[in-house]
Image (cartoon, grey):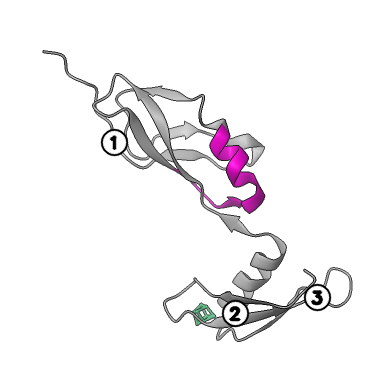
Amino acid sequence: MTTERELICIICPVGCVMRLFPDGEGSAPPRVEGADCAKGREYAEREATDPRRALTSTVKVRGGCFPLVSARSSAPLPKHMLLPAAASLRGISLQAPVAAGQVILPDIMGTGTALLATGTVERKKFH
Ligand code: SF4
């Protein structure tokens, strides 16, 4: 981190406006101002050093009532991996039925984080 930056805490509804100042010596954590609690300071430090986000996407389904099922990572991924991880899902297709909570991938790109279905897709009925 090289310049001062402003950040709104998303940990609770209070939404404290925090300011991050460049770290001083070596690997010292950045200085945080404006956080009303330790959780907010921790969030700001993580945003400065290792920002992470949940991956949300859809995956193709074969033979289902819907052609896609929604999916989400079981934990946040490093922010720089979100686009490659989303792109890696394009070649995947599941066979219906798909249940909410089903593991689609046990380990997204070697992160140790699973991709889970967040919706249900029943098998398509033929009459
Ligand atoms: S710093 Fe603490 S009180 Fe402020 S928004 Fe974050 S979690 Fe809430």
Name the residue type under label 2.
Ala
Residue corresponding to mark 1: 120
State whether residue 69 is above or below residue 55: above
Residue corresponding to mark 2: 38
Q: Secondary structure at mark 3?
A: loop
State whether residue 49 is above or below residue 114: below
Instruction: Pinpoint residue 71: horizontal percent, then vertical percent.
Output: 42, 40
Q: Secondary structure at mark 1?
A: loop
The part of the chain drawn in magenta is 72-87
Q: Earlier in the sequence, mark 3 or mark 2?
A: 3
- Number of numbered discs: 3
Res 107 visible: no
Nearest to the eye among marks 3 and 2: give it: 3
Which residue is outermost to the right? 26
Question: Which residue appears at 63% of the width and 35% of the height?
Answer: 109
- Is residue 20 a member of the stretch shown in magenta? no
Name the residue type under label 3.
Asp
Instruction: Pinpoint residue 12: horizontal percent, then vertical percent.
Output: 45, 75
The picture quadrant where one finds residue 43 is bottom right
Label 3, label 2: how far apart the Cα atoms are: 18 Å
Label 1, label 2: how far apart the Cα atoms are: 38 Å
Label annotation for residue 23? 3
- In the drawing, does residue 78 fall left or right of residue 8? right
Mark 2 CB within 8 Å of ligand 1: yes
Q: Earlier in the sequence, mark 1 or mark 2?
A: 2
State whether residue 35 is above or below residue 127: below
Instruction: Pinpoint residue 27: horizontal percent, then vertical percent.
Output: 84, 68
Name the residue type under label 1.
Thr
Label annotation for residue 37? none
